[in-house]
Amino acid sequence: MTVQETAPFDIANPGLAREGLNRIEWAAREMPVLRLIRERFKKEQPLKGRRLSACLHVTTETANLMLALKDGGADLALCASNPLSTQDDVAAALVHFFDLKVYAIRGEDNDTYYRHIDACLAQSPQITMDDGADLVARVHRDRTDLIPGIIGGMEETTTGVIRLRAMAADGALKYPIIAVNEADTKHLFDNRYGTGQSTLDGITRATNVLWAGKNVVIAGYGWCGKGFASRVRGMGAQVIVTEVQPVRAIEAVMDGFRVMPMAEAAQIGDIFVTLTGDINVLDRHHLEAMHDGAIVANSGHFNDEINITALESMSESHRRVRENVEEYLLMDGRRVFLLAEGRLINLAAAEGHPAAVMDMSFANQALSTEYMVQHRGDLPPGVSSVPEDIDQEVARLKLRSMGMSIDTLSDEQVRYLSSWESGT
Ligand code: ADE
């Protein structure tokens, strides 16, 4: 029997289920918006009978999203969106306590990763949910037979949206996808404060370095890079930013960071972190310029931001010196420490973004799924935005859950904003 034919799950250790449940409940305390959606979904059943396959990081926060979708009536299958991000106790809890079809094992090899994606597709989904677009890519490459039955999908992350837009530009994307990442209540908080904190957390857990006084080189000043830079500065590090986009480079300068090309930064940095979404951002010539003991890590979605092939070919040997830290001994005697195999450090070495921020990201996922089902057949193939009223509703609910209220415009102010007569 192959996994993709019939097995209802493939997880590392069912014995971890109780521990997983405790942690899922702990995360739920910080996810009030998703809780409200879950309660409504339970009553209204907007996803009743819909087969939904999700390829997401299998974390406590994802578990809470799955439970909301399940309570909304969805028939779910879940696989991992990265070989190193699965929390095995969470996978076990979802199978044992909630009878979900889960295919995810932390540390799975590439073949198993894709076998799990295939297993997740075996239920012939009507809805796909991705973090990085591997599920959608697999459907369009190898399971085109499924496309006529798919209503649409959702995409969680910047890298996935870029990939899907490239597919759409090629005319290759055959069903509608809502770019959850582009909701304000997603990227302004998840990418900035979530990645900022969880990247710091991952590198700290992997290395236990003291940040104060370190030269930290950050590649990329998008929302993730911005968030990480501000957090690392708060820890007392000297931050250098590298960028390719002039506007973002000016932003970094005016935010108070040094900006320079990576070739220069490579000679100065103690810790290098890539958050760009592009390949070989730390390339051979950068690795060649680094001082003995430099630490390199990636917090972008895919593990190709650091040229690991070059690092291997430059090295005499390598060895694991502690969990998630591989020491590469270069031919000239210098050592470079690679964290978490160059995979996203925040999920591989820590627990990903905290639940309070995933609350908004996954509220957008849940409401966009409902929207997709309600508007089935209406959206054209391609990438579309999260509807503005969903984004605003998530913000309102989050504010309320934080015990905060804000002002509203008076009638006079509304009139003023829609008129042009009054001026100087
Ligand atoms: N991406 C980043 N952090 C995450 C988390 N905690 N759960 C799911 N996906 C994530």
Image (cartoon, grey):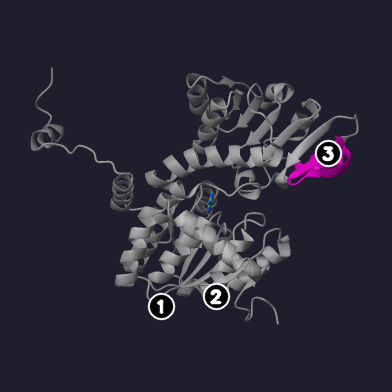
Q: Which residues are magenta?
A: 307-329
Q: Is residue 399 left or right of residue 86?
A: left
Residue visible at 51% across and 29% down in the picture: 230
Instruction: Look at label 1 and name its amino acid.
Output: Gly
Q: Nearer the viewer, mark 2 or mark 1?
A: 1
- Residues packed near mark 3 inside 10 Å, few (<14), some (14 to 19) or many (20 plus): many
| Residue denoted by label 1 | 49
- Residues packed near mark 1 inside 10 Å, few (<14), some (14 to 19) or many (20 plus): some
Find numbered disc 3 in the image and state the secondary structure of the residue it sits on: strand
Magenta-drawn stretch contains 373? no
Q: Closest to the observer: 60 or 154?
A: 60
Respond yes or no on whether mark 3 lies under 8 Å from ligand 1.
no
| Residue denoted by label 3 | 328
Find numbered disc 2 in the image and state the secondary structure of the residue it sits on: helix
Q: First in sequence: mark 3 or mark 2? A: 2
| Residue denoted by label 2 | 145
